[in-house]
Image (cartoon, rainbow, N blue to C red):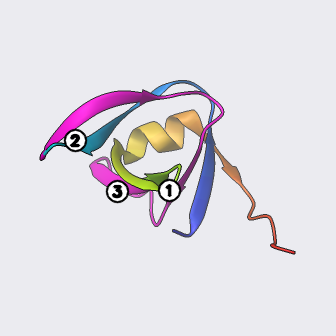
Amino acid sequence: MNQKFRIKSPTIALFAEEGRQVAHIVPAGSIIAADSTSGDDLIEVSWEGQPVLTFAQDLRDRGDSVEEIPSR
């Protein structure tokens, strides 16, 4: 995942649970990583190490880009 975003307001994401997609809220302040935010469709992102789906438009509207912190 190339781009990281800090979520400014709670955002809905779809989580895979028991073979189906279940909507949950990703809280404000969370960091989400994405390969791309183009388009308006659902995109796969990473939150707390797990893949989830969210709308690209939500990520653009409710997220601020954050820079990668180099590892020591």
Vertical placement of residue 6 versus 72, above or below? above
- Callout 1 amino acid: Gly
Q: Is residue 44 left or right of residue 70?
A: left
Vertical placement of residue 20 versus 4, above or below? above
The segment highlighted magenta reads: 19-45
**Residue closer to the observer: 62 or 17:** 17
The CA span between labels 3 and 1 is: 12 Å
For the point 87% across and 75% down, which residue is it?
Answer: 72
Q: Secondary structure at mark 1?
A: loop
Badge 2 is on which residue?
17
Tell whether position 32 is magenta: yes
- Callout 3 amino acid: Glu
- Of callouts 3 and 1, which one flags the residue occurring earlier in the amino acid sequence? 3
- Callout 2 amino acid: Glu
Q: Position of residue 40 (x, y in %)?
A: 31, 47
Tell whether position 23 is magenta: yes
The CA span between labels 2 and 1 is: 15 Å
For the point 61% across and 56% down, which residue is it?
Answer: 4
